[in-house]
Image (tube, grey):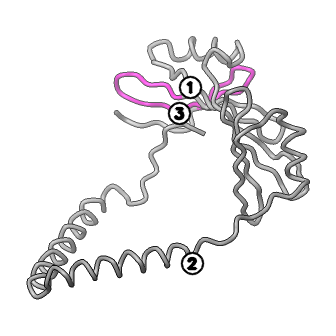
Amino acid sequence: MCIIERNPIVPVNNYEQVLEGRIILDRKAAVFAAGFSKQKSIAMKKLSIAIALTAMFLGASAFAGPEPTVSSILENALRKNFAGATDVNWEFTPDFNFANFVVDGKTVDAAFNEEGDLLGFSRNIHLTEVPKAVLESLQAKYPDFTISSQVAEVRYEGKTFYNVVAQDKKKILKLKCLANGRIFVESRFKK
């Protein structure tokens, strides 16, 4: 889903501290490297870099395991629910199997269980493709807002809703719109 969200890993009030700590660590590393490099010859530096690159390559390839195979149940479920899907990529978790693919020129993300049941999916559509009730509600409720032309259509547990981003001069709203035209503000951000 391509809705813009602000979900920082580091809380804003600690960001300056983290940034400051990084600068201090970088300075210490630079001072250490400068003192250490004076003692090495150019040949030793090249050898060190070659060894480090080799270690990084071997370390990365050690973690690359065999690519998991997709069961015929999941392949059939994908074909049944999304005929003509191309460029299929799978991601597996203990509880769900996620497929990312293209249908009719649109990128789709879908979730399946091990039995091949479609649990839900999302795709990006144009604002003009949402139901008329949604468009009318957006125009009536947010007449002074700019509505993003990209909308995330989500189908989950038999219900369809549309994630829309609306903004005015002061704020950005993430809206959840039901097909019947009801609109809920999921989150709001100051500009």
> Label 3 belongs to which residue?
174
State left or right for residue 82 relative to residue 168: right
Answer with the quarter of the image where residue 169 lies: top left
Q: Position of residue 95 (x, y in %)?
A: 77, 62
Mark 1, secondary structure of its residue: strand
Pointer 1 with pointer 2, Cβ within 8 A: no
Q: Secondary structure at mark 2?
A: helix
Q: Which residue lies most toward the front here?
A: 43
Nearer the observer: mark 3 or 2; the answer is 2
CA gap, disc 3 and disc 1 = 12 Å
Q: Residues within 10 Å of mark 2 (few under 14, many from 20)?
A: few
Q: CA distance from mark 1 to mark 2?
A: 41 Å
Q: Are marks 3 and 2 in contact (CB under 8 Å)?
A: no
At x 68% / y 31%, what residue is drawn?
A: 153
Which amino acid is tagged 2? Answer: Ala
- Residue identifier under label 1: 150
Residue 171 locus on image (x, y percent): 39, 29
Q: Compute the Cα span from label 3 to label 2.
A: 42 Å
Residue 34: in magenta span: no
Identity, as a three-letter code, of the amino acid under mark 1: Gln
Quarter of the figure with residue 13: bottom left
In front: mark 3 or mark 1? 1
Under tag 3, what secondary structure? strand
For the point 88% across and 49% down, the residue is 117
Residue 72 location in percent, x, y? 90, 54
The tag on residue 62 is 2
Q: Quadrant of the C terminus?
A: top left
The furthest residue to the bottom: 39
Q: Earlier in the sequence, mark 3 or mark 2?
A: 2
Per the rendered image, the range of residues in magenta is 165-184
Quadrant (top left, top right, bottom left, bottom right) of the N terminus? top right
